[in-house]
Amino acid sequence: MTGLDPPRLEYAAPGDRYADYCLWDYEPLGPTAGRLRQSSLLWHSLTAAGADRRLFAICDALRAGLGPGRSVWGAKLRDGVTTWEFYFYDYARLERSVSIERVLAILAPFAPCGLHYPGARPYFMFSLDLDDALARGTRSLDRLNVYLGNPGSSVSSGLCYGLTAQGLVLDNLYSFFETATEREAIAAKTACSAHLDLPGLDRDAILWPELMRCGVVVVANKRLCDGVYFSRIDVDGLLYFLDRLAYPAEIRDFVRAERRRLSHLLFDLGIDYAVVDGRLTVTKSAYYGLL
């Protein structure tokens, strides 16, 4: 079974939420009447990848179970293959209503999960990966990514732990910077890396000048690579990102054709990078939106 053809288009409506991939709200950039929701890009990416219809049903179930504007999706491209990661936030910490238990209960009819994370621990966000194998039942929901704050740091930051049947592993440290006022700190953070050689490092290959007009830059130190995320980018920045990374033509053509109806939105974009055969290489990339 494959995805819908043509892909769904969802139109903005009064009362819609506008928020970035951290679920921090923003005001739309212009009129919203007759414009598209970011969910249209999710449905289009699923269709372009030939996703199983059950994957659409899982996304629908998450929105129905949590309510609109409570889930963030990321369409991730690695080695020409697209998968999707969903992120669930609740900044109430221990008083949270969007909990791991609640989301796993929504997913149980599609993908039962045997993992358990104690609710008494103060995470503010978690994520999980969706793909055709999960939708078809050929793999289990065998990993959760759990995010905690990092008090005492001189910059806003967070920790990510991977939870599997083998237990918890510290995976990533995320550091948040205001682009307008902290450019030197951003450059210093990207240069301080276990994966990069400083002599001859081209920082523009990491901090793309075309995207450095964004509101916030997040630098991630990961086990096998590093990452940088450009938050609150307009649709022209999204198009530049998709073109530079040679996303499938169907994705790029859709965004280009719908540019006007997406121009009220802000997007979040990310790349993972490492030195491969002596060259700085983007190993994974993703664009994000609200469901």
Image (tube, rainbow, N blue to C red):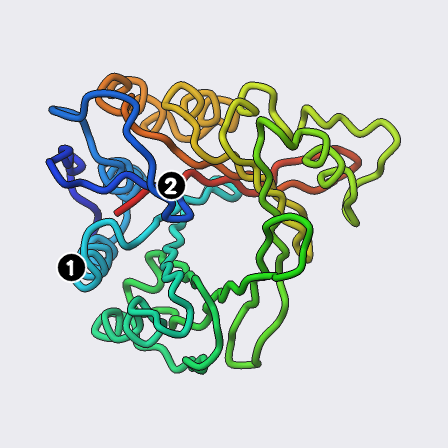
Going by the image, does 1 lie left or right of 134?
Answer: left
Point out the frontmost of discs 1 and 2. 2
Amino acid under disc 2: Asp
Residue 127's x, y, as percent?
42, 61
**Quarter location, residue 153:** bottom right
Q: In the figure, 101 relative to 265: above or below?
A: below
* Mark linked to residue 56: none
* Mark linked to residue 64: 1
Which mark is first along the chain, 2 or 1?
A: 2
Residue 139's x, y, as percent?
39, 69
- View extreme (right): residue: 199
Going by the image, does 244 lie left or right of 238?
Answer: right
Indicate the secondary structure of the residue bearing disc 2. loop
Real-space Cα separation, disc 1 to disc 2, in angstroms:
20 Å
Amino acid under disc 1: Ala
Residue at image point 60% right, 25% down: 208
Residue 272's x, y, as percent?
60, 43
The total of numbered circles placed on residues is 2
Indicate the secondary structure of the residue bearing disc 1. helix
Residues 6 and 192: in front is 192
* Residue that numbered label 2 is attached to: 20
Circle 1 crowding by C-alpha within 10 Å: few under 14, some 14–19, many from 20: few
Q: In the figure, 68 relative to 119: above or below?
A: above
Residues 195 and 82: in front is 195
Going by the image, does 229 lie left or right of 274?
Answer: left
